[in-house]
Image (spheres, helix red, strand yellow):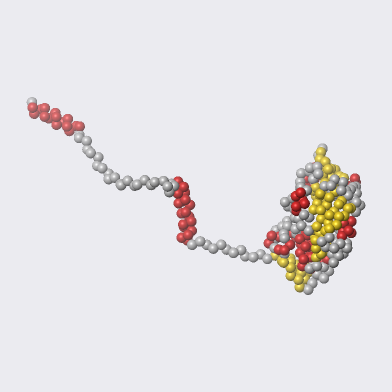
Amino acid sequence: MVVKPGDFLLVNYTLKVKESGETVDTTFDSVAKDAHIHREDSTFGPKFIILGEGWLPKGLEESLVGLDPGTNKTVELTPEKGYGTRDPGKMRLVPIRRFREKSGVEPNPGLQAELDGRPVVVRSVGAGRVQVDYNHPLAGRTLVYDVSIDKILENENEKILNLISLRIPEVQKEKFSLKKHQSDLTIEVPEEAFYLKGIQVAKKEVTSDLQKFFPDLDTVAFQEIFKRSEPKPELPAITAKQAEVAPEKEEKAEAEPESAPRKPKSPAKKKETAAKKPSTSTSRKRAKMGSENQR
């Protein structure tokens, strides 16, 4: 089966700039690492597209028509067939304070950011202003694609799940459940997606995509199921008491190691009655009386 416009495809490619030979994009993790463009927050693997929707440069999409899945092809695109020629009129000077407020990042030359909902490249920073370029980063470049069709999607559920993943890439598409009854579709949303930033906007975009590419769908519903968490079993009272005493025993064990000999307890001494000292006054008195008799 050859590729035709409107097909749902999984595509693999590696993109290089002809003028410099630099690898700037790829769907392969190993190639990204070798080219030093690998990012931990990036997801690698075949790219999902609907041929003819402009999700790839027009010249590349045209070259895929009639291609057999699994066939590799090298395609060279001039700027006109790629991301267009550079337009000097798309350069702007923006106050640095406004740039920070709108983009949420600190400007640095070469930085790619989003400003007023449009991608920009920072060309220079100075004198309280930032020069931004609204041209595509690859505008004016000759592009060389090594491309192949990984798969033509035929299963309807597989197509729907890939459309969902396109708008909600943070969650694996296999975690979404689909239930279709005639012209009604229910999408069960996994718990990981409940509180994602912008999830309501993403749901609206998914709905628009599904109704555009599946005209038989009248309604699209999103179902979020909150399950009761299982309570932890309570420990018996004795066990809990032991758990409270245990730390004290451990502290005592640390203070007095088992290897240390224990001192035998000395028997309790009886309280001795203090010996009465002879009264000095009495003895002196008796001696005086004796001397008087002798007289």
Tag count in the figure?
0
Q: Is residue 232 in view?
A: yes
Residue lying furthest front: 71
In this view, the residue farthest toward the top is 295
Say left or right for 261 vs 28.
left
Locate residue 254 relative to residue 83 in the image: left or right: left
Residue lying furthest right: 80
Residue nearer the viewer, 47 or 21: 21
- Residue at the (69%, 60%) spot, across then down: 192
- Residue 6 appears in the picture as rendered: no
Measured from the top left, where is residue 57 in percent x and y? 87, 55
Q: Position of residue 278 (x, y in %)?
A: 20, 35
Image vertical order of residue 180 relative to residue 36, above or below: below
Position of 115 with respect to 250 (left or right) is right
Q: Quadrant of the N terminus?
A: bottom right
Quadrant of the rendered image containing residue 88: top right
Which corner quadrant holds the C terminus? top left
- What residue is at 85 percent from the left and 57 percent from the top? 73
The residue under the point 77% across, 67% down is 157
The image shows residue 65 at horizontal and vertical percentages of: 88, 62
Where's residue 22, x and y in %?
A: 82, 47
* Residue 164 quadrant: bottom right
Residue at 48 percent across and 59 percent down: it is: 239
